[in-house]
């Protein structure tokens, strides 16, 4: 392939369909205005229909990472903050910046499972728990319904579940917010819907979080709002793209295992490859392949690679094979 192959950001490799792009362009014609309340109400209604949760529990915002940052800022003061380690790096960075007491529960290869007892043992004082499910960078499911309910029964605990990759995992706890005021789900249209350039995220929030976030005003650009509305009105394209990515993920996993690589099973649109080859990310970059270097969290050559177009994935596999052949 010509040029760099970028498999570093977990983006959807396809543009959204023309009607979504056209809606974004139409939004640009109102570039001097914030998105109006009527459009934001339409967006909340569509998100409610999509999640199966009433509109009153939905809060749109400028990207799920921004919403996670606001949650950490609002609730970490005076609370212990508990996370899995490793977790989504920007969330970890904000936790370190704002929390007064941060507890990291290590998840380790090969299964990357979160020990429920280790989590529940931390709930002896006011606690903010943030779990990315599936986990980034491992791609594994960390928490099940039984553990979620056990956490929520503890009135000392506030539980945040980041479901950025829900469309790939099909695991969600969004329906629980109606009966559990201490639960909030964060999601995004960046990944499966192919709207990374629009930066539209949303909360599915229990009453405790709704009361606090009622004081916040999240402004969304016109183009982002219109694109999100158009995408949610006809989401069949998203399901087709997700199916393509899941099929490609399985193919890439099989090929990498055949090369002798240690690859973690994933419920997302990326794969975690554990290697002990120093500077694997830099070696791949020299060959025109951009991936995410996670060696600071695992072995020295460990990488997270997004699943892209078939030809992009093949370019990555070919480059990886050349690197290990050179080493041998």
Image: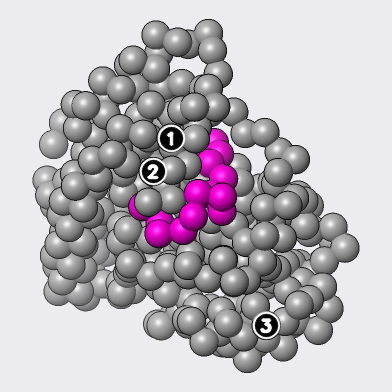
Rendered position, 159 above or below 89: below
Q: CA distance from mark 2 to mark 1?
A: 6 Å
Q: Nearer the viewer, residue 151 or 57?
A: 57
Single out the residue that lies furthest toward the bottom. 117
The tag earlier along the polypeptide, 3 or 1, is 1
The residue at the point 15 percent across, 62 percent down is 247
> In the image, which disc is placed on residue 46?
2
The tag earlier along the polypeptide, 3 or 2, is 2
Instruction: Look at the image and say whether residue 51 sits in the magenta stretch.
Output: yes
Rendered position, 167 above or below 82: above
Q: Quadrant of the N terminus?
A: top left
Give the percent coordinates (x, y) of residue 148.
Answer: 56, 79
Give the percent coordinates (x, y) of residue 229.
Answer: 36, 34
Q: Which residue is mark 1?
A: 42
Q: Nearer the viewer, mark 3 or mark 2?
A: 2
From the viewer's perspective, tell me whether residue 137 is left or right of residue 245: right
Secondary structure type for disc 1: helix
| Residue stretch rendered in magenta on the structure | 50-63
Q: Nearer the viewer, residue 182 or 243?
A: 182
Give the percent coordinates (x, y) of residue 81.
Answer: 74, 67
> In the image, which disc is placed on residue 153?
3
Q: Nearer the viewer, residue 205 or 104?
A: 205
Rendered position, 267 above or below 219: below
Q: Quadrant of residue 250?
A: bottom left
Secondary structure type for disc 2: helix
């Amino acid at each position: 392939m010509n040029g760099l192959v970028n498999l570093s950001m977990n983006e959807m490799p396809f543009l959204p369909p023309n009607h979504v792009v056209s809606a974004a362009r139409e939004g640009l014609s109102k570039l001097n205005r914030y998105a109006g309340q009527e459009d934001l109400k339409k967006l909340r209604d569509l998100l409610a229909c999509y999640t199966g949760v009433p509109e009153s529990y939905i809060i749109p915002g400028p990207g799920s990472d921004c919403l996670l940052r606001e949650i950490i800022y609002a609730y970490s003061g005076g609370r212990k903050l508990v996370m899995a380690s490793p977790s989504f790096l920007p969330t970890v960075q904000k936790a370190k910046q704002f929390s007064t007491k941060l507890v990291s529960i290590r998840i380790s290869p090969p299964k990357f499972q979160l020990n429920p007892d280790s989590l529940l043992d931390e709930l002896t004082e006011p606690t903010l728990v943030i779990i990315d499910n599936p986990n980034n960078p491992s791609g594994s499911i960390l928490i099940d319904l039984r553990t979620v309910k056990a956490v929520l029964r503890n009135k000392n605990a506030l539980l945040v579940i980041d479901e950025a990759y829900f469309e790939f995992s099909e695991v969600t706890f969004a329906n629980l917010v109606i009966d559990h005021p201490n639960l909030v789900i964060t999601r995004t249209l960046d990944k499966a819907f192919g709207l990374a350039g629009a930066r539209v995220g949303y909360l599915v929030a229990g009453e405790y979080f709704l009361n606090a976030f009622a004081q916040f005003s999240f402004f969304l650009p016109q183009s982002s709002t219109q694109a999100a509305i158009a995408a949610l009105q006809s989401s069949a394209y998203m399901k087709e793209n997700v199916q393509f990515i899941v099929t490609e993920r399985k193919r890439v996993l099989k090929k990498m295992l055949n090369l002798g690589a240690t690859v973690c099973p994933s419920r997302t649109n990326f794969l975690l490859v554990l290697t002990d080859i120093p500077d694997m990310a830099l070696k791949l970059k020299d060959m025109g392949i951009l991936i995410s270097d996670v060696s600071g969290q695992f072995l020295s050559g460990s990488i997270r690679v997004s699943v892209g177009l078939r030809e992009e994935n093949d370019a990555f596999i070919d480059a990886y094979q050349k690197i290990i052949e050179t080493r041998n």
